[in-house]
Amino acid sequence: MKPRDLSPQDWKTRLTPEQYRVCRLGGTEPPFSGAYWATTDPGAYSCVCCGEPLFRSETKFDSGCGWPSFYAPIDKAKISELVDHSHGMTRVEVRCLRCDSHLGHVFDDGPKPTGLRYCINSESLTFAHDPTSPDGRGED
């Protein structure tokens, strides 16, 4: 079964309650609470729902906002961006194209070279260490 074809009940059995709330219901974790907001290890961040690789540590930066922030995805064709008018503001929501999981939002206040800040919930990601990094830890 393709990830987009899973029912809400299927997702509830695959995800923790907090992952379900964030990824399937469009929630947001509290700032500075997620597992990856301060991670600086080399590696890749993938969608927790379907495993699609989405961001690399080389594009991660400390934005001070309390969520993992990246200036670019691995491949922009692997995400979708939707206008989000929730909470009395207009933002651009970022979703995984493969499984339609809510990831976070993108803002135009990031660093060069893109000027973008992909502000992503840790609950929507998994992290795999780069096995070629000096610490040689391999996958997490």
Image (spheres, grey):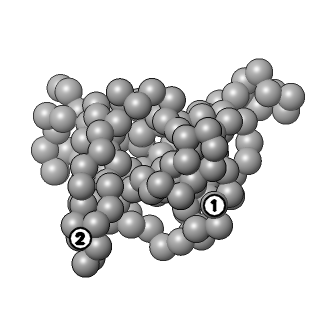
Please say whether residue 129 is visible from this viewpoint.
no
> Residue 10's quadrant in the figure?
top left
Task: Residue at 35% x, 27% y: name it.
Answer: 77
Crowding around mark 1 (Cα neighbors within 10 Å: few <14, some 14 to 19, many 20+) is some
From what the image shows, is residue 124 above or below residue 129? Answer: below
Q: Quadrant of the N terminus?
A: top left
Task: Residue at 59% x, 67% y: name it.
Answer: 66
Give the CA distance from mark 1 to mark 2: 23 Å
Amino acid marked by disc 1: Ser
Crowding around mark 2 (Cα neighbors within 10 Å: few <14, some 14 to 19, many 20+) is few
Q: Which residue is mark 2?
A: 86
Task: Residue at 51% x, 48% y: name it.
Answer: 116
**Secondary structure under the numbered disc 2 in the rendered image:** helix
Estimate the x, y position of residue 21 in percent, counting from the top left. 30, 63
Residue 77 is left or right of residue 114, and the answer is left
Residue 136 is left or right of residue 43, and the answer is right
Please say whether residue 57 is visible from this viewpoint.
yes
From what the image shows, is residue 113 above or below residue 52? Answer: below
Amino acid marked by disc 2: Ser
Of residue 136 and residue 41, the one placed in the foreground of this image is: 41
Q: Which residue is mark 1?
A: 63
- Residue that protrudes farthest toward the top in the picture: 132
From what the image shows, is residue 1 above or below residue 35? Answer: above
Estimate the x, y position of residue 120 in percent, counting from the top left. 47, 54
**Secondary structure under the numbered disc 1 in the rendered image:** loop
Estimate the x, y position of residue 80 in percent, counting from the top left. 29, 39
- The earlier-in-sequence mark between 1 and 2 is 1
Task: Residue at 32% x, 54% y: name it.
Answer: 93
- Residue that protrudes farthest toward the bottom in the picture: 88
> Residue 114's quadrant in the figure?
top right
Residue 114 is left or right of residue 57, and the answer is left
